[in-house]
Image (cartoon, helix red, strand yellow):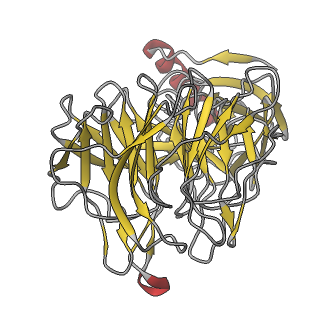
Amino acid sequence: MKEVSIQRQIGLFLLCSLAITFLLAACDGDSITGGGGGGGACTVANCFGGGSTGGGGSQNPNLSISAVPGDGENTLTFALSSGNADSFNIYWSTSPDTTTPTWNKIEGATSPFLHENLSNGVPRFYGVTAVSGGSESDPSAVVGAMPGKWTQLDQVTVIDPPARDSHTAVYNPTTDRMIVFGGKTQSATLQDLWVLSNASGASAGNPTWTPPNVSSPPPIRASHTAVYDKQTNKMIVFAGSGSTDGTSLLRNDLWSLSDADGSGSPSWQLPPFNGSPPSTRWGHAAVYDEQADIMIVFGGAQTGVAIFDDVWVLEDATQFIPTWRQISMPATGGPSARCCMAVGYDSTNRRMIIFGGFGGFGQSGATLFGDLWTLTFDATFQTATWKELTPSGGTAPSARCCAASFWDGSKFLLFGGGTFNNSSDDKIYAFVLQDDTFATADGASGGPPARTFPTAVPAGHFLLFGGTEEFTPFNDLWRLE
């Protein structure tokens, strides 16, 4: 088999188009059932990466393809539901953008096809065409897969954290430590603090849990948020619920933990602040811009009272006296009010990313979301703009709430989550974002059991802790490599 890089050149495109017109006139039109786009034929230059698909922007409904990721490999299965084909061509790229000349071609592929020797953690997107009588069909839909391998980690400790959900976890990449705070067990809401050293496994030995001895912690809470600044080694905790059901005894207090990763002498403070804080809430989202020292808060709920769509910033978040400020947003054009959404932050573009969540109360009045939005700030964080991104490739996750997620610098990763009947998902998804669209790649299977309300941090590719399934919490650790 031969793999070649696609190079789009206008002159070559015109020559190929003339050649294809001649071939189509000479061959049997029933040999391949095309998608109705431009006569059902395409070339290396215009199937993928030529500004259109199938010579006319169409996909072939009679061609199907699936991609299953493994450790350093993706297995592709494809078929033509009607018509005949002499062979198949696979097109692949690390970008889902079919308008760019970055797609590669594998000629004469047979199903199943093993695409191997791949780097784990890098999404790849695939399409296939059928070839018959020298003519190439319109391409299939685009699918995505991200190679990887899940490992459940042994924990070498005298005592492990109690199994929990609705907690927070942040990560210091400099010291390779994860910091876990609060959450709830089956019978109690927590205020404990745990530090996991060697979280990524980069050093010899297994990860190790330590409960730092810290006096005067915040009141018990779950469904709160925490952000972390590695420059000052501070963790900022905001709001949440103090009840065992995780939705009442709501708070809007702000706490700071110095020496948060346990490398010094951790200490809790209840800092004074300027401005009026957001109202009490749980299930909100919070992210942190390290360069600007700003925490951003969106949404959340007061059970039976209100669900929010407001946006707040905490300026000088790690300083002695931070300042709360609400961002004025248009009444329309943004996401519906919600809580328990997945969230990440792209610091390069100053944008918060949210997916899913739910709005309303009760089984009949609640709405589960499956949309993806970005909230982009100006350079001074005075204004912000919402944009909904539409799916362009791969299979987007179903509507859900209560998943674990983060932005890893190039993509948005999401694991788990559930629906109102607590039917959780045990898949990981990689979202690759473009200006107005997103494409998803399925991640490797064989990892953690399905769950809701876990946490994840970017230690290795993806480090998962805790969560619950049908009210049974976990305290296991899983790493995607």
Q: Nearer the viewer, residue 344 or 211?
A: 211
Say how many tags the image has.
Answer: 0
Q: As drawn, which residue projects farthest toward the front?
A: 215
Task: Please say if 476 is above or below 127.
Answer: below
- In the rendered image, the quadrant that contains the C terminus is top right
Q: Residue at x 43, y 16 (%)?
A: 10
Give how far across and how far down residue 337 sits, in percent: 32, 65
> Can I make out residue 37 in this image?
no
Give how far across and how far down residue 334 sits, in percent: 27, 56
Give how far across and how far down residue 56 sits, in percent: 47, 40
- In the rendered image, the quadrant that contains the N terminus is top right
Q: Residue at x 32, y 40 (%)?
A: 295
Q: Nearer the viewer, residue 270 or 81?
A: 270
Give how far across and how far down residue 316 sits, in percent: 25, 33
**293 with respect to 153 (left or right):** left
Task: Please say if 392 is above or below 330.
Answer: above
- When asked about the image quadrant of residue 210, the answer is top right
**13 with respect to 296 (left or right):** right
Task: Please say if 343 is above or below 90.
Answer: below
Q: Residue at x 67, y 63 (%)?
A: 468
> Can I make out residue 295 in this image?
yes
